[in-house]
Structure formats: C-alpha cells, structure tokens
Amino acid sequence: MRFSTLDEWLVWQEALHPKTIDLGLARVRRVFQGMGTPLPMPFTIAVGGTNGKGSSVAMLDAILRAQGYRVGAYTSPHLLRYNERMRIDGQVLDDESICRSFDRIDRARGDTSLSFFEFGTLAALDIFAQSELDVQILEVGLGGRLDAVNIVDADAVLIASIDLDHQEWLGDTREAIALEKAGIFRPGRPAVVGDSDPPKTLLAYAAETGIRLDLSGRDFGFEKTESGWNWWGAGGTLAGLPLPALCGEHQLFNAAAVLQVLGSIRGKRPVGENAVHEGLSSVKLQGRFQLIDGTPPVLLDVAHNPQSARVLADHLKARFPGRRVHAVFAVMRDKDIEGVVTPMAPLVDRWYLAPLKMPRAATSSELVDVFGHCSIDAVSEGYADAASAFAAARRNAHNDDVVVVFGSFFLVSEFLALEP
C-alpha cells in the first residue's frame, strides 16, 4: 500500500491531478473497469441539481433506512471529516476501509491520473458494491453528464433544482446548465424534477430522448397545514405528514420530490407510510440552516450561489424578523459573489469577511471590491483567520441579535471545528 493513513492518501491525491475539477468519464470509467468491482451495482438513486442535493440525499437515506433497507450514501464535500462522504446505514466509513479501497484504485489506475473527487467517487462505488446494500444514493458532484458519478446507470434520478453555479464548467445560463444536469437521466427509468420552473431545454431533452419526467406541480406536489403537510403524487396521497426535521420552508419542496422518487420505485423498493413519518422526523444534516443555540444564536448555512442565498434571506426574515444580523462570510472566487451578497444585503447590519487559507477562496480585498460595487459599507476585514472573524461577530452582537455564518463549506467547517 502506497500510504498507511487516510490523511497521507488525501494529501497525495490533492496534488496528483493537474486540475482540481476535470470533467469527463473516460479516465474514471477505465479505472473502475480495471478494478474488477463486483457487478451489478446496488439499486441506485442519483441526486443532482444546484441546491437541495444534500437535503434530498439525507431524506432519502433516512426514510429508506427507517423501512429497514441497508443503504449507502455518497455525498460531497464534507464538513469535518473526509469519512462523512461515505456512509452505510447512517455510519461514516472507517479510515481502514477507505484506505484499502484507495489502494485498489491506485493499483488499477496504472499511469491514469485521477482527481481528488474521482478517487473518492471510485472508493464509494467500490465499497458500496461489496457491502450487500439494498440501495445506494449517489449525490452528483458537479453538473451531471460528465460527473464521475455518471459512470453508473442510475435506476432512478432526482434533480432537486437548477440555477446558476459553476458557470465556468457548466455554462452561464440555466438552460445550458440544465442540459448538463439532464445527462444523468436514463431512458425507461424514473426521473423526477423538483424545480418548480424547469428550463425548456431540460423538457426538450427529455422529450427527444424518450424520458418521462415527473414535474413538481404537475405530477406531484404538497400543501402545508397547521400541523404538518399533505403530499400527492405517484402512488396516491399522504396526509398529516410531519414537517422535515431540516429547517426551512424550502425543505417541503425537497421532501415532496423525494416522496415522488420513492413512489416511482415502489415496485422495487417499497416504502410504507410509517417509514416516511419516521424518516422525515429524524433526518439530520449539518450546515443547512443549522442553529447553534446561545446568546446570540448562530445560524450556519452553506449558501454559496444566488438561489441558495435568496432562500437563506427568506429564512432569516421568517425565523428572525426584526433582529439585527451579523454575517460572517467567505466564498470561492469563482462563484457569483455579487449574486450571493445582493439578496442578503438588506438584512445584514454588519459583515465580517473571514479569510480562508486556500487558493480558490476570494481574498478580503476581492470581496471588498464586490461589496463596494453593491454599495455595502458596513464591512469589517483584516482578520488573521476565520476564528477571529467568528469571535468579532459574537463579541459585537447583542444577546437578541443573530450571527449568520454562511457561504463556503470550508467556512462552516471551520466554525464547527471550533465548537466544543
């Protein structure tokens, strides 16, 4: 084995491939075929989209496990430990299992270079295939058509939402991005779209390739009630459902699409109403409207594109009306920073720019330029590290204010790592 610890493997992988993101399936498929991983693969649900992927995977996982299925879930990125990316029956995989899989990948790849993400995807597929799963749920990392996850022909697909993100690789319009995400569809297999306004290119692609789409508002939907919510869609209706344990009104849209996926596969993986209730009530996911109680309270969210920032702003208005907001913010420079900042600007009383020590992160000076363009002047910068920005926000906030830590996964990860 090339390395004896997971950390050594990960440091090596980060420097192995010349590009951090290198879309394409030829290299990763060639290595996967060379590994001799058992086939057929477990029953597979692929989850793509711009926002809502992590929440949808978490709900699918919780409901299917509540039904008694043995479930593997692959997501990215992680918040605290790399191992979070691969779970079986809700438990993260141990270092030894991941290292053994990395060794099999390394031996099979020969002189083929793989990216950090491709190594992780292959490891998840390899481990899941050998773990006697009833279902594997795979979150698509970026786009869909050329994402490493797409070497697997999914038995059912959910696209949670479509908006602008990763434009450098996917295109600069919703229409172009939709075509990339549609690449995970497979003819004759269920395809659910949770976006309430799917781009016409997505609909046209499905029509041209003979894929029947289940669309939000047409084929399934929901209504909120005083005590919960009701759902209608594939397989009938469900009334008196508990609200998802994940915060935010938008989670009902995600949950409705999740139930449509489960309804569409009921002939192969049936799920009862009790499991739906249990899964929705017990689902957990860090970093999405995650509230840390205290004085002041701290709200964590990985909103890093315009759509997710709008959803975060709506949540703040509903959950903390009239409260002063102190926002700790950091984001990657390849994001639509102005589009992220703009919907939050009317709600934030003071911004704290947290430096992230990584090449892709926007520097404080770059962020200041964007804030100036948006006519935002309530900005504090010059912190030595993210921890200093967190401390300043908490120190300046009154007990009845709220501190919001949002933007990059890496920022939220740093905050969680500091919490006792």
Image (tube, helix red, strand yellow):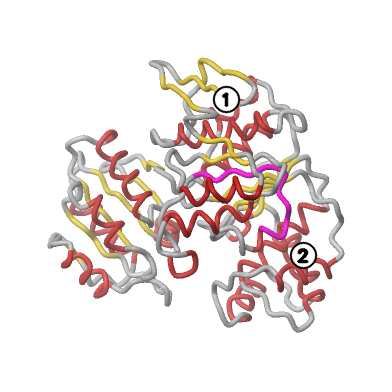
Q: Quadrant of residue 196?
A: top left
**Relative side of 209 to 219, left or right:** right
| Count of marks overlaid on the render | 2
Which secondary structure, mark 1? Answer: strand
Task: Say which residue label 1 marks.
Answer: 233
Image point (31%, 41%), residue name: 294
Q: Which residues are magenta?
A: 150-160
Residue 337: percent from left, percent from top: 31, 63
Which numbered circle lies on residue 101?
A: 2
- Please state which of residues 62 and 417 is positioned toward the viewer in this rendering: 62
- Please state which of residues 173 and 418 is positioned toward the viewer in this rendering: 173
**Relative side of 264 to 305, left or right:** right
Residue 20: percent from left, percent from top: 54, 74
How many residues crowd mark 2 within 10 Å: few (<14), some (14–19), many (20+)?
many
Residue 49: percent from left, percent from top: 51, 50
Image point (39%, 49%), residue name: 301
Which amino acid is tagged 1? Gly
- Taking the magenta stretch, the answer to whether it contains residue 155 is yes
Instruction: Give the CA separation, mark 2 to mark 1.
Output: 40 Å
